[in-house]
Image: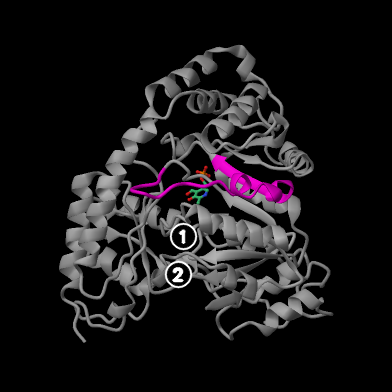
Amino acid sequence: MTVRKRPREEGWCSGPAVRPGRSAAVPGPVPPVAAAVRETRVPGTFRVWDDALMTAATPPAQSPTDRRVSARIGSISESATLAVDAKAKALKAAGRPVIGFGAGEPDFPTPDYIVEAAVEACRNPKFHRYTPAGGLPELKAAIAAKTLRDSGYEIDASQVLVTNGGKQAIYEAFAAILDPGDEVIVPAPYWTTYPESIRLAGGVPVDVVADETTGYRVSVEQLEAARTPNTKVLLFVSPSNPTGAVYTRAQVEEIGRWAAEHGLWVLTDEIYEHLVYGDAEFSSLPVVVPELRDKCIVVNGVAKTYAMTGWRVGWIIGPKDVVKAATNLQSHATSNVSNVAQMAALAAVSGDLTAVEEMKVAFDRRRRTVVRMLNEIEGVLCPEPEGAFYAYPSVKALLGKEIRGKRPATSVELAALILDEAEVAVVPGEAFGTPGYLRLSYALGDEDLVEGVSRIQKLLAEAKA
Ligand SMILES: Cc1ncc(COP(=O)(O)O)c(C=O)c1O
């Protein structure tokens, strides 16, 4: 069982551990939370910059005018998954036959009826103007209706905030409920954006690591071991990015009851709710454990269900006071989401689920192929993902072995070797808080998928002690 309280791991694609002009020691008194965080630090593992995040009251060493980028923003790593995708696309544009397993987005176009709704909205001058910051009333009502239809959760439209994608929803939700030093339990492997959003809000992510032996699902015992008097929130996501793990209803219930018993808040990310395969079933936490509702924030969006990643529409569902606070924040940060995109989202959530059912058939087929082919490689172990569109194999047994004259010691190095030698882009587990793994998104065409994994098979077959 592993619990890690870590302000920031040295990112695989991030900058130096100690930034120029900044000493490792932060001057001035250290509030108790920062001190506690430091105690748990493994030398060389974390960036010193995090102390600045934790100690807003502490005067920095340099004068304000010498500091160019703020400590808070300078500490953010580039999104690792977007970085891999960008690198793969750049290599492709340069003429290399790269196959990308990096992107977390369906390879299907947005369904026509949704695009048509957007075209119509473009032509309506009403939508050329500002609209309410928290979302179009008709979209909020449709999201409430969709939530009842899909998860059996009855909410009022006033409990909805329409955001620029699920990412903004997560950022605003944490910003609305966290005070400096509040701890958020984050099951790892985790999606890269969670810890960054938590830190930006002044919170402290506390990882609870699950591995392939439990299908990447954490237990209540692990969560309880991570709970402290500073714990405010449990982050929960099922189906999961990056592992594809889906918790059973009984597990969801057990975790929800534990959170309710300790008065914890829960942020539950339901963005992959419709992408479950085989016997797996999606269960919504506030439906399974209704006593959580007053402290439960649901994050969702149209990106994955309707192949609408570029449209940027997501939402928060939560208690009215929190939704109001997050709406106030959004009113100053970005105002309303593009009306055209909101009208497209309205068509999406008001329509049926035919499009996602069709995508699911393709994803399920690719899922079985990719898992089978990965498990054929000696040294690779890939549990069967039951949801989303990711496979998360362990490659620990391959690390340190010689492959084409190199000895990759980490999954970062192995991913780099795979890109250089096989021209296949995968995301190393370091990006998700668990070195020793790779993430492959199987939301790409069947032919590319088989060709890409065949190339990986061929390369890794060369591994020798
Ligand atoms: C688990 C999870 N939640 C939320 C999102 C946010 O999606 P978007 O901001 O595109 O709506 C993603 C995107 O990859 C995701 O994987």
Which residue is disc 1 drawn over? 80
Q: Is residue 377 visible?
A: yes
Position of the C terminus by quadrant: bottom left
x then y, percent, for residue 120? 50, 14
Q: Looking at this view, is 293 or 423 the one in front?
A: 293
Is disc 1 placed on a helix, strand or loop? Answer: helix
**Residue depicted at x 51% and y 44%:** 271
Q: Looking at this view, is 352 or 101 the one in front?
A: 352
x then y, percent, for residue 66? 73, 67
The numbered dot on residue 430 is 2
Position above or below: 256 against 42 = above
Position above or below: 334 against 247 = above
Between disc 2 and disc 1, whose residue precedes?
Answer: 1
Looking at numbered disc 2 in the image, what kind of residue is underneath it? Glu
In the image, is 76 to the left or to the right of 39? left
Is disc 2 placed on a helix, strand or loop? Answer: helix
Q: Magenta part of the protein: which range?
A: 275-300
Looking at numbered disc 1 in the image, what kind of residue is underneath it? Ala
Tell me, yes or no, whether the two marked residues, 2 and 1, touch with CB atoms within 8 Å: yes
Foreground mark, 2 or 1, reads 2
x then y, percent, for residue 126? 64, 14
Q: Is residue 69 visible?
A: no
Position above or below: 465 against 178 = below
x then y, percent, for residue 4? 59, 76
- Residue 206 placement: quadrant: bottom right
